[in-house]
Amino acid sequence: MANMMKCINPFSITSYMGAAYFCDRDEETKELAGALSNGRNVTLVSPRRVGKTGLIHHFFQRLKPNEVQCFYVDLYSTSNLHEFTQLFAQEVLTKRITPFSEQVWAEITHFFGALRPVFGTDPITGMPQCTIDIQPQREEWTMQQIFAYLENSSTPCYVAFDEFQTIAEYADVKMEALLRTHIQQLHNVHFIFSGSKKHIMTEMFSSAKRPLYRITQMMHIDVIDEQAYYSFAAKHLSAHGQSLDADTFHDLYTLVDGYTWNIQSLLNRLYQSGVDRINHNSVLLTINQILQEEMPSYQMICRLITERQLQVLRAVAKEGVVKEPGSSVFLQKHRLGAYSTVRSAIQNLLEKELLYQKDDGTYVVYEKFFALWLKEH
């Protein structure tokens, strides 16, 4: 067995751990840098678990704090303007007081005095924290103050709104129109609008009927190149006393369609195992372990959709990629019946993010481990 001394697992599945543990994305990082440094906002789109959030953090870390200020806001948990503004304000103000200084404290107190900033310490991380009291019906004014504060910064500010498609579901405000009003007046603040629901993000920024039409550069990211990923994986495993040949990695990479999170999950466990020589059997054992752990979740999903939707989902999983779901060959092979009902099932599965339609129009099961489980059940 390989040397099992305690060390950091280089294959993170939860957070960005720094450039040393980040694979490739050199061209994408350069593209982001080129756009924002030249005043172009970016709409960043990719399927879930391909790595767009990691790319944002990697890009931000490469920038010098004394030259650019960076703010990352994950909107996934928000459902209205108040929550958006509270989260945005907390990210901006907490970043500004880290590290804490009397000068920054005075600056924030002066600028946001009417909002009563409260300074404290995060009970989990121990880091300085700053929140402001946002009064009902004052959210729009508060947002305006935050943007004004960033606009007056001595250095450019980059703001990344992740899972940006969430704002389309706000019922209390026309959020896209409100943001456009502020964004078009800013010169010192530039944005990354990142999202995983391709059809919503594309509609937001590419439809002439929407307020954010053509205000950004569209940027789609795909899976990491297999050879680049293999070099990254082999290097870190070798440093741990483990070997992984290119053919075995190809099998691993292909089984999950190159999706970053799924590859990281497998490599994380293979690294933990300490096995000297990782082979195809090692990969299959690790996948089976994951599928056994996730079985209750997968069974729950199957119970929450209709029988026809489950039939279609299984059929797509077994095919891997479906180009023409309305073809007689596909329908007859999987005994799916009339295409009218299959088409309705596909639409529902897309909305539930159980199926995903790729840029070439083909359909795949969105979650790659779930697809592997469906093939066998």
Image: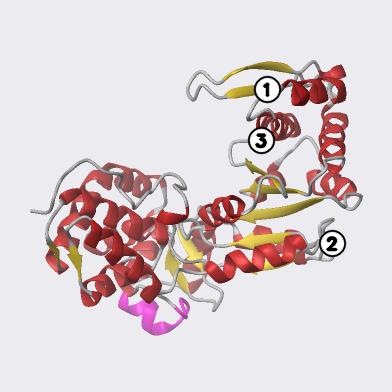
**As displayed, is residue 144 above or below residue 48?**
above
- Residue 130 tag number: 1
Label 3 environment density (alpha carbons within 10 Å; few <14, some 14–19, many ≥20): some
Cα separation between marks 2 and 1: 38 Å
Q: Which residue bears the numbered disc 3?
A: 79
Q: Which residue bears the numbered disc 2?
A: 209
Q: Give the magenta part as a residue range.
A: 323-334
Q: Nearer the viewer, residue 55 or 81?
A: 55
Q: Earlier in the sequence, mark 3 or mark 2?
A: 3
Label 1 environment density (alpha carbons within 10 Å; few <14, some 14–19, many ≥20): many
Q: Position of residue 163 (x, y in %)?
A: 61, 48
**As displayed, is residue 244 above or below residue 329?**
above
Lateral position of residue 32 relative to residue 289, left or right: right
Residue at left offset 38%, top offset 62%: 313
Residue type highlighted by circle 1: Cys
Quadrant of the image for the C terminus?
bottom left
Residue at left offset 72%, top offset 50%: 67
Q: Secondary structure at mark 2?
A: loop
Please state which of the two labelled residues, at mark 2 or mark 1, is closer to the viewer. Answer: 1
Residue 56 occupies quadrant: bottom right
Q: How many tags in the picture? A: 3
Residue 333 occupies quadrant: bottom left
